[in-house]
Amino acid sequence: MNLLKDDFISTSQGKISLKTILTGEQNYQLQYYFDEIQLAMLQLLSSLSTVVLQPTVQELKDYLKNGLTPEQYEAALDKVESQWFESDCFMQSKPPTNAKWPDAPITKLLSGIECGTSANAMGLFSEIEQAEISCTDCMHALNYNLHMNIKGECFGPTGATGIRGGGAISTLIAGENLKQTLLNNTIAKDYFNDYAQLDSDAEQRPMWVAPLSGSVYQASKIGINRGLFALAYHIGFNIEDKPCLCDVCGSESEQSVKTFNREKYKGNYGSTKNGREAGAGWWPHPYTPRTIKEEGAFAVCARDQNWQSWQELGSYIVGKETDKATLEPAYIIKQFQYMKTPRQTNLLVGGNIADQGGITGRVYDLYSMPSSLNKHLSKVTQVLDSGLDQKNRLSQAFNKMFGAGYDKNFVGGIKENAMYRFTANAQQIIQRTLLDVERKEATELRKTAVIELKQEAQRIFMGVQRKYQHDLPLFKALVKGESALYRK
């Protein structure tokens, strides 16, 4: 099976090829049981599209406007070393001689399932049986997910941090259908070259063809095709000639995969502490927003289980500067704004919330965006600012409790629980409000958001007041806090 030619993509209409998606007119829907694999497949397919098409900005605009014919796809494919994308070698490099080469169940390639015994093992799914066996097609989605999305600490001492950093958030431009989404996230080679400023002799061959060597992996030496499929592990899959019903896509298969072997690469990318200190440099992965600090560049990650993506959404689109750091949007956002595509789209924010070796939550949020981010960005930012303002007011109102004379951990727990409920419910309010981003003016959107968010904050605050109305010190403190919440 070849990933650039054959049917390996699971959809609601069966297995299809990348060519079928990019050159057809049907509205296919990806079909995978786990949302993190849906996300990984969008990343993987957009990266494969980049390798095949290698478009300029102008060519990509034309594909988005007029579509892509089968003949155009085949002509582009003729220029690619397609043998590098055969199923038996894609993203699989052989380990060094005498490597330990430990094996593990494929469960480990789904970060929401914890099959370890560490003290901090916290899985989103309690039953390992939910993903014990995979077809050979889904093997590639799982492998890509490991290298790009799963935090190395999930493997303990044998884990490795990939080119994106551990547990990085991804931002993608979601279109009206799967074809448009993949083209929206295909990288324009001329604009990326100007943005990334890689060395002219940067290696383009994938790492399973020309393996990494040395103790430091210099970002400027890694070309776009090499970086999009960068490896953190030598890896191999144990394919059995036994039929299965795949736990990942639900399809029947003549072959099955239950285990894989891995050995981490010994060098360091600039996404790691050792790599930063050695001057490796940050490789600008197209779907990764980054934070730039005095000590170097870091992938943006979900902070903790109480974190909601709307709080940082403005930063993902326009960036943000603070006294200690600068947050830069992912390259793909900059490319989309530069291309000025005249249609409404959505922004997909996805990733795992990691706590050392465990996964405590997931992010998979879709936000409606205006047809022109350059002209109408204030429609989005005013809604987000309303949420952040209301969150700050609610926080100030609860802070009065710390003067009631109780243990700070006790009071802090009350506040944390209430603030979590607000940020979680505000997530839904903001997503719902932004559904009208194309139909309504900025002032009207902001007004709607302010009303709903204020009502939600007041509802949560009054709930806490009622709960502690018989605790006089706390109740008095909460009454004092009303001025922060209700001020105009």
Image: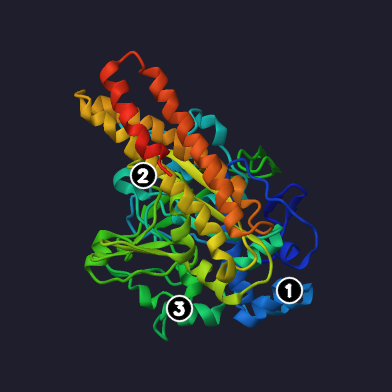
The residue labelled by disc 3 is 195
Label annotation for residue 65: 1
Q: Earlier in the sequence, mark 3 or mark 1?
A: 1
Q: Earlier in the sequence, mark 2 or mark 1?
A: 1
Q: Quadrant of the N terminus?
A: bottom right
Cα–Cα span, label 3 and label 2: 34 Å
Residue located 56% across and 32% down the image: 130
Residue located 32% across and 55% down the image: 98
Report which quarter residue 443 is drawn in: bottom right
Q: Is residue 216 above or below residue 396?
A: below
Is residue 223 something one can see in this rendering?
yes
The 10 Å Cα crowd at callout 3, few under 14, some 14 to 19, many 20 or more, is: few
Which amino acid type is shown beneath numbered disc 3?
Tyr
Comparing labels 2 and 1, the label whose residue is closer to the camera: 1
Disc 1 on helix, strand or loop? helix
Which amino acid type is shown beneath numbered disc 1?
Lys
Label annotation for residue 155: 2
Q: Is residue 405 above or below residue 171?
A: above
Q: How many marks?
A: 3
